[in-house]
Image (cartoon, rainbow, N blue to C red):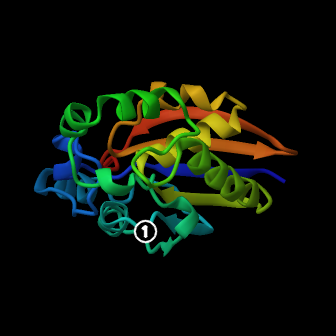
Amino acid sequence: MTSRVLLVSPATSASLRQARFDDGGSLDAVGAVRARAAAGSLPAAERVAVSPGARCRETATALGLDGVPVPELAGLDVGRWRGRTLEEVGAAEPEAVGHWLTDPGCAPHGGESVQDLCGRVARWLADAQAVAGRTVAVVEPEVVRAAVGGALGLPVTVFWRLDVPPLTVTELSGRAGRWNLRLGRPLAAPDAD
């Protein structure tokens, strides 16, 4: 039995453009237009899962996907840093930011550690692999990072070295406890041929 998981990163939001920790805001106008233009570009799926965040839900809707919010696929909880820019937090708490970026087990912001996020996503991915067919999941970039790292057995320390551009698809296919990775491709409007 082969399982396929297509991880779709959301379109852009003001937070993303401002290098701001996600504040739960909506897609910006450009992101919404690009997501609507990409509707129909994904293959049919037996299941559609969506990160509970606004920009993931809005991206899924714009893509024409009727997804179920899955709490395990929520973005990284950054506690009191939510809504602030990395520059602001770095100026106010430089040691905490440095520690957070180098130690996946710490959470100086009072939220969730990267290690905890990776564990949560790994559990969801194990469940997804036990189900035949295709799952499309519209999820935050950090969830894509966690899934790819876990699927390939990478150390959690590589988390920040994986870039996930907006509106891209990263595909995992697997069976018998092993995953293969197809690196992200941009979502684009389907060909009109």
Picture quadrant where residue 75 is located: bottom left
Q: Amino acid at mark 1?
A: Pro
Q: Point out residue 180 in the picture as x, y percentages from the top left corner.
A: 70, 35
Q: Is residue 171 visible?
A: no
Q: Is residue 172 visible?
A: yes
Query: For this rendering, which residue is in front, 116 or 53?
Result: 116
Q: Point out the residue furthest to the right here.
A: 176
Q: Which residue is mark 1?
A: 52
Q: Point out residue 169 in the picture as x, y percentages from the top left corner.
A: 46, 43
The residue under the point 66% across, 28% down is 155
Position of 46 compared to 32: left or right? Answer: right
Query: For this rendering, which residue is in front, 22 or 105?
Result: 105
Q: Please tell me whether mark 1 sits on a helix, a strand or a loop.
A: loop
The residue under the point 67% across, 58% down is 124
Query: For this rendering, which residue is in front, 190 or 37?
Result: 37
The residue under the point 54% across, 30% down is 103
- State which quarter of the image contains the N terminus: bottom right
Picture quadrant where residue 181 is located: top right
52 up-or-down from 23: above or below: below
126 up-or-down from 167: above or below: below
Q: Point out residue 132 in the picture as x, y percentages from the top left corner.
A: 76, 61
Position of 143 compared to 35: left or right? Answer: right
